[in-house]
Amino acid sequence: MCNYCGCRDFPLIGRLSEEHWQIEETAGALRRAIGESRYGDAALLLDELLAQLVPHTALEESGLFAELRAEGALAGAVDRLCGEHDEIHGVFGAIDRAAPDWPAVLEAIGKLHRHIDSEEHGLFPASVIMLSISAWDRITPEPAAGG
């Protein structure tokens, strides 16, 4: 994950980046489980990965991506990333638990890694420059109670 541009100082991007880190950790554990033929663990990790991805992509698409699409300049990149969300979710969600296609999972993990890299090093820094303060105000999460 990038640490050079300061985009993580924006609360929403900081949250999404932290979620990316957690998703990458789970995906790495899944890749290792498959590589070590620990398929029972792999199935559990696949479910864990999906449980992380679904709310994460919903937050991206309903917040940051919606604002970027409305702003216009990065709409094409947002459309591409949303398509990748659908593709990655589709592979992970369609895996037959009785006869898993582990090579397809490994390929999707590779796509997921490239996707996260594109967001972290491309879209997130660009969004800081492209979006207005009022857009950031709309998508900045409220501070946690007591903090």
Image (cartoon, helix red, strand yellow):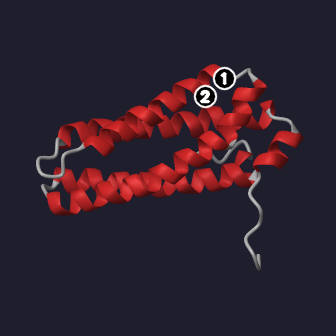
> What x and y, as percent, mark residue 116?
50, 40
Of 131 and 97, nearer the camera is: 97
Residue located at (74% from left, 47% from top): 6
Residue marked by disc 1: 75
Is residue 18 rendered to the left or right of residue 10?
left
Q: Can residue 20 be seen in this view?
A: no
Is residue 87 rendered to the left or right of residue 107?
right
Q: Are marks 1 and 2 in contact (CB under 8 Å)?
A: yes
Query: For residue 4, what is the image quadrant?
Result: top right
How crowded pointer 1 is (Cα within 10 Å; few <14, some 14-19, many 20+) is rated as some
Residue located at (53% from left, 30% from top): 81
Q: Is residue 36 visible?
A: yes
Q: Looking at the picture, which amino acid does disc 1 mark?
A: Ala
> What x and y, as percent, mark residue 15?
64, 56
Residue located at (61% from left, 43% from top): 60
Residue located at (23% from left, 44% from top): 95
> What x and y, as percent, mark residue 33?
22, 57
Of 40 and 99, nearer the camera is: 99
Question: Which quarter shows the C terminus?
Answer: bottom right
Q: Which mark is residue 78?
A: 2
How far, Cα to Cα, is label 1 from label 2? 5 Å
Of 10 and 146, nearer the camera is: 146
> What x and y, as percent, mark residue 82?
53, 32
Secondary structure beneath dot 2 equals: helix
Of 69 and 126, nearer the camera is: 69
Q: Is residue 3 above or below residue 118?
A: below
How crowded pointer 2 is (Cα within 10 Å; few <14, some 14-19, many 20+) is rated as many
Is residue 32 rendered to the left or right of residue 18?
left
Is residue 97 rendered to the left or right of residue 22?
left
Q: Looking at the picture, which amino acid does disc 2 mark?
A: Val
Q: Is residue 72 above or below residue 18?
A: above
Q: Residue 19 carries which label?
A: none
